[in-house]
């Protein structure tokens, strides 16, 4: 009798365990399926956001193409430079901007055809002073980019310095590919990079600075002897009446003794940065692209990245 009761009790326990196991498995499967559905929905939503941003990039390139056809100069009052409020597309909120990449000093100007460029070194040295950094960093950066392994000055660095780092690495000895490369250059800490970021850029080839869009600190760097205050006044004047030629710039400089190298400056641009962000609920998408409209009826994409 006891044996029968024990067997019955054991059977009940086994049955309960089986039910619990089936319930747990079903719960796991339901949760897994729910997570898969959510992930799929998020992926589809993110894909939709990216497609909207690509459409925005295409629209931006059309604006730049029309601008090149209608005007030989580029300034901050043109359509491409207009800051539009966020727009709606289906359930998405989209915001974007077009910025003149040549409003900033191009760090790849420092080395041309593998050799250091003294005029550009002087410009960058002045720009470093403008942000409170030591001008010898211009030589340090140039040594990372030129095609030899010789140290330019006692304050610069080549392979020997970088091989002491943890982990050790060799100098690239080639042009920069992005601004983030500065973090691997001796002397360029996060604070200095943050100060420089609004004033410098990295473009695939040497480029002049557009005086119609350059911020005052860049103007002070590309025009030797121009003070920060004079640069601010010049920028204010330019924003009211953009320069059509470099001769106009010379005529409107605050002092007759000021001179500049015409090869360093322009009144128009070819490279532009297009940035866009899209959001719906908790899903966000971002896109950045560098475009070049030189020598083509329609701008070409130099690079494109998701943000």
Image: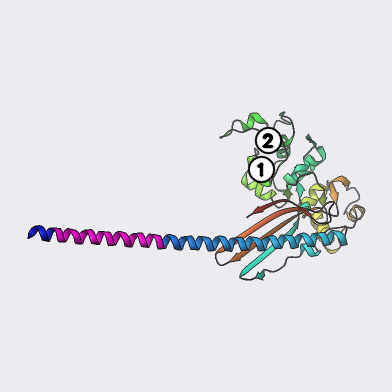
Q: In which quarter of the image is the N terminus?
A: bottom left
Q: Which of 87 and 85 is in front in this view?
A: 87
Q: Spatial distance from mark 2 to mark 1, Cα to Cα?
A: 10 Å
Q: Name the residue under label 2.
A: 172
Q: Nearer the viewer, residue 46 or 189?
A: 46
Position of 21 with respect to 133 (left or right) is left
Mark 2, Cα crowd under 10 Å, few <14 / some 14-19 / many 20+, is some
Principal SS element in the magenta part? Answer: helix
Q: Nearer the viewer, residue 59 or 271?
A: 59
Question: What count of labels does the image hold?
Answer: 2
Q: Which of 23 and 188 is in front in this view?
A: 23
Q: Position of residue 84 (x, y in %)?
A: 72, 67
Q: Is any part of residue 191 visible from this angle?
A: yes
Q: Mark 1 points at which residue?
A: 181
Residue numbers of the magenta segment: 7-30
Q: Quadrant of residue 141?
A: top right
Q: Where is residue 244 in the image (x, y as percent from the top left)?
A: 90, 58
Per the rendering, the mark at residue 104 is none
Residue displayed at 63% across by 33% down = 162
Tell me, yes or no, whether the two marked residues, 2 and 1, touch with CB atoms within 8 Å. yes
Q: Is any part of residue 261 visible from this angle?
A: no
Q: Is residue 162 above or below residue 252?
A: above
């Amino acid at each position: 009798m006891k044996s029968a009761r024990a067997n019955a009790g054991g059977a009940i326990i086994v049955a309960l365990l089986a039910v619990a196991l089936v319930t747990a498995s079903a719960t796991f499967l339901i949760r897994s399926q729910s997570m898969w559905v959510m992930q799929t929905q998020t992926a589809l939503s993110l894909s939709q956001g990216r497609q909207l941003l690509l459409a925005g990039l295409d629209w931006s390139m059309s604006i730049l193409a029309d601008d090149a056809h209608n005007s030989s100069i580029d300034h901050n009052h043109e359509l491409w430079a207009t800051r539009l409020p966020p727009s709606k597309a289906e359930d998405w909120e989209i915001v974007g901007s077009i910025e003149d990449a040549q409003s900033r000093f191009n760090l790849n100007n420092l080395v041309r055809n593998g050799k250091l460029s003294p005029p550009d070194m002087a410009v960058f040295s002045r720009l470093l002073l403008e942000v409170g950094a030591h001008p010898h960093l211009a030589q340090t950066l140039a040594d990372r980019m030129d095609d030899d392994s010789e140290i330019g000055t006692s304050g610069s660095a080549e392979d020997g310095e970088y091989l002491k780092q943890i982990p050790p690495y060799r100098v690239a000895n080639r042009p920069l590919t992005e601004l983030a490369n500065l973090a691997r250059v001796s002397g360029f800490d996060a604070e200095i990079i943050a100060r420089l970021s609004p004033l410098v850029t990295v473009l695939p080839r040497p480029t002049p600075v557009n005086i119609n869009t350059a911020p005052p600190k860049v103007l002070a760097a590309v025009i030797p002897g121009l003070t920060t205050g004079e640069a601010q006044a010049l920028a204010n004047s330019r924003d009211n009446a953009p320069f059509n030629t470099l001769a106009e710039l010379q005529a409107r400089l605050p002092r007759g003794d000021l001179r500049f190298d015409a090869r360093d400056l322009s009144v128009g641009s070819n490279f532009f940065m297009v940035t866009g962000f899209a959001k719906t609920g908790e899903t966000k998408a971002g896109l950045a692209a560098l475009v070049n409209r030189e020598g083509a009826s329609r701008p070409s994409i130099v690079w494109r990245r998701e943000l």
